[in-house]
Image: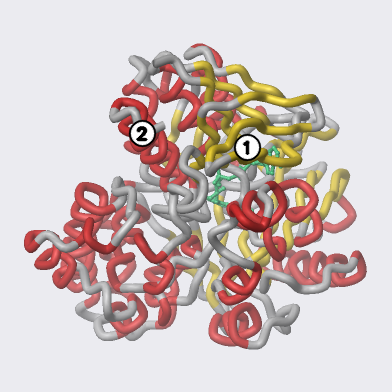
Amino acid sequence: MKKKIVVIGSGFAGLTAATHLSAAGHEVHLLEKNDQSGGRASVWEKDGFTFDMGPSFYWMPEVFEQHFEHFGYKASDFYQLKRLDPGYRIYANKHQQIDASADLETLKAAFEQREKGSAKKLEAFLKDAEYKYHTAMGDYVNRLSDSITEFLEPRLIFKTIQLNLFSSIRSAIRKQFKDPVLVSMLEFPVLFLGSTPDKTPALYSMMNYADLIKGTWYPMGGMGMVSKAFTDLAKLKGVNLHLNTEVLNIEVLNKMAKRVKSNQGDFDADIVISGADYHHTEQNLLNADNRVYDQNYWEKRSMSPSALLFYVGLNKRIEGIEHHSLFFDEDFEQHAIEIYKDPKWPSKPLFYLSAASKTDNSIAPEGCENLVFLIPLAPGLTDSDDMREHYFNVQMDRLEQRTGQSLRANVVVKRSYAMRDFERDYYSFKGNAYGLANTLLQTAFLKPKIKSKKVNNLFYTGQLTVPGPGVPPTILSGEIVAKEVLKQIQAKKI
Ligand SMILES: Cc1cc2nc3c(=O)[nH]c(=O)nc-3n(C[C@H](O)[C@H](O)[C@H](O)COP(=O)(O)OP(=O)(O)OC[C@H]3O[C@@H](n4cnc5c(N)ncnc54)[C@H](O)[C@@H]3O)c2cc1C
């Protein structure tokens, strides 16, 4: 029964799937094209600064914990978590700001101060979000989502109605809250789902529960510590990790993947799982006969945004900023139009700033600040150095104005990262940063499937399949595919 399993890509999904399958006694080879594991959660080190290149918000800590617990460990065996308070700060226009306090009473007081009656409404809103969170996590996200029939049990149909799948989160929020700053705080988590609030089902208010009640955490040493922990655990469980190993082709014979060809040689396989971007695997690693989705299908998908990032080291500290800051001081609607409806470089971008050195001295030299700037952008835009530099200046101007401190002369490390880098490093379709947008028509069984319909022993995992983008969902995706593979081995189907 011992199978030879090749997993392509060492992001969280690939690492999770590989660990489960190796722990179940199979021979697992995890092939990664880059020189480090972790995928989009890679790390860049320069002159004493350690930058997290991708994710920075550690949400839904129980999903990480369950991963370690499954193998007899705790997250704290690998890294130390700190809950951030506030979770983040929002800078709104006209010099207004609000903090996402970790203490619910303080948060309610901040709401009430801005809008009379909103504290009570927030409590009720979060109660409903809690129900959605537990229902979704208990009944929906762990499903293979291969077909609609999985969701047709009467019990689930009843629950689905209660989850408000068919109304938008925008209307759910705006029906109750009028103050624009409060609205922006409640709509912000939706940005992680790669879509706009009007296109996102109200179900996703579950993210507000994840944000405001479960909290924003920080792994000391940075998110790179988490990808390292997943990698260390994978190795402890016997996974053979091959870095700098780029898969070039999946050889298929009689509807079975037989061999994975890479730039480091060939790997025979009984089962293949791809945790690399779905579009890349199908379009570039398989012959046309074995593809389930054609290029036209992908062109019609609504992708999550790409992003322009700057990793910046300052040789001084900035006074008065928090670990996570959201510069929502320009018109959100206009920026959203420029991402989704009329793709272009934004006229007045919103941006996110991480200053993780506020919490963690180990990621910057003494007296220095570790900054990451991020502007969400339409996927597929033409990407030029001049354009990048223009936006660096826009962000620095706004940061300097808001903090009243001059910073530009103190930049000692600077690197930009955008569409063409995502394409080069991850073979990301149109340079998307985090997969497919979570719109209603791209949810559950409407997403690209985990099981190939053409190649019997080929499976997919990661942010382009179920349950969706973000580190916790991709961990769950790795679990779902591993469970399905084990089930099929048991049933002697593969
Ligand atoms: C800038 C940014 C910020 C984000 N912020 C957050 C956040 O704050 N919180 C959060 O939870 N999520 C965040 N996300 C999303 C989250 O990082 C991703 O959803 C998740 O890490 C994706 O994991 P994955 O395993 O699906 O894919 P990936 O991490 O992309 O892994 C796929 C791997 O496959 C490899 N690969 C591709 N092609 C080949 C090939 N031919 N051969 C071998 N290997 C190959 C790639 O090199 C890569 O390592 C962010 C993402 C980005 C980019």
Which is more N-terminal, label 2 or label 1? 1
Q: Is residue 323 above or below residue 352?
A: above
Say whether residue 386 is left or right of residue 174. Answer: right
- Quadrant location, the C terminus: top left
Label 1: how many Cα within 10 Å (few below 14, some 14–19, many 20+): many
In the image, taking residue 191 as reference, residue 123 lies left or right, namely left
Nearer to the camera, 293 or 31: 293
Residue 128 higher or lower than 235, as above or below: below
Instruction: Name which quarter of the figure residue 374 lies in.
Output: bottom right
Near-viewer residue (425 or 153): 153
Q: Which mark is residue 9?
A: 1
Q: Secondary structure at mark 1?
A: loop
Q: Residue at x 53, y 31 (%)?
A: 15
Residue 485 seen anywhere in this rendered image of the structure = yes
Asked if one can make out residue 361 in the rendered structure from this viewpoint, the answer is no
Q: Which residue is mark 2?
A: 493
What residue sits 61% from the left and 61% below the top? 352
Disc 1 beta carbon < 8 A from ligand 1?
Answer: yes
* Percent coordinates x, y for residue 22 in the rendering: 46, 19
Please state the horizontal and vertical placement of residue 402, each as a whole percent of the image: 66, 68
